[in-house]
Image (cartoon, grey):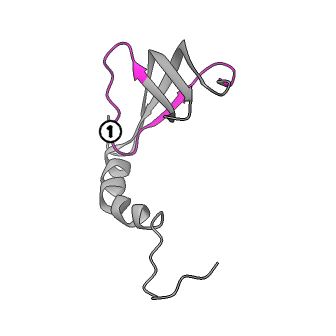
């Protein structure tokens, strides 16, 4: 991995999509032990997975991992906390109105 260049890695993966009352999630586990670091991008290949309500669907897929360059990784680490704060909603009023 260079200072400004990206690397591309291919990995088999297991995709689990849950659409149950107890849990609504989608997880990807890399079967070859690949680890994702800040700034990396992952593209899972294949058609969209739709789990009917009350079910969990597990499929084997291939994924492409685009590794972030050193500069992108550093930038992601430096600005990641600020982007997280955009997801938070704060209210300091005593009265709640809708």
**Where residue 34 sits: x, y (%)?**
33, 22
Say which residue label 1 marks: 37
The region drawn magenta spans: 29-50
In the shown orientation, is residue 52 left or right of residue 86?
Answer: right
- Residue at image position (42%, 36%) is 6
- Residue at image position (39%, 41%) is 68
In the shown orientation, is residue 92 left or right of residue 57?
Answer: left
**Where residue 64 sits: x, y (%)?**
50, 24
- Residue at image position (40%, 22%) is 29
- Dot 1 falls on a residue whose secondary structure is loop
Please identify the quarter of the rendering in which residue 83 is found.
bottom left
Q: Residue furthest bottom?
A: 94
**Where residue 65 sits: x, y (%)?**
45, 28
Is residue 97 one of those drawn in magenta? no
> Main SS of the magenta segment?
loop
Quarter holding the C terminus is bottom right
Give the class, few, some or many, for how many residues have Cα within 10 Å of label 1's Cα (few <14, many ≥20): few
**Where residue 96 sits: x, y (%)?**
54, 82
Classify 2 as above or below 85. Answer: above
Q: Nearer the viewer, residue 35 or 56?
A: 56
Q: Nearer the viewer, residue 4 or 64?
A: 64
Q: Nearer the viewer, residue 50 or 70?
A: 50
């Amino acid at each position: 991995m260079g200072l400004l260049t990206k690397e591309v890695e291919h990995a088999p993966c297991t995709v689990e999509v849950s659409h149950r009352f107890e849990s609504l999630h989608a997880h990807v586990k890399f079967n070859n032990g690949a680890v994702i670091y800040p700034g990396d991008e992952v593209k899972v290949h294949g058609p969209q997975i739709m789990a009917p309500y009350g079910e969990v669907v597990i499929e084997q897929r291939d994924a492409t991992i685009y590794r972030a360059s050193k500069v992108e990784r550093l930038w992601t680490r430096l600005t990641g906390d600020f982007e997280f704060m955009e997801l938070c909603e704060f209210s300091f009023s005593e009265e709640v109105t809708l």
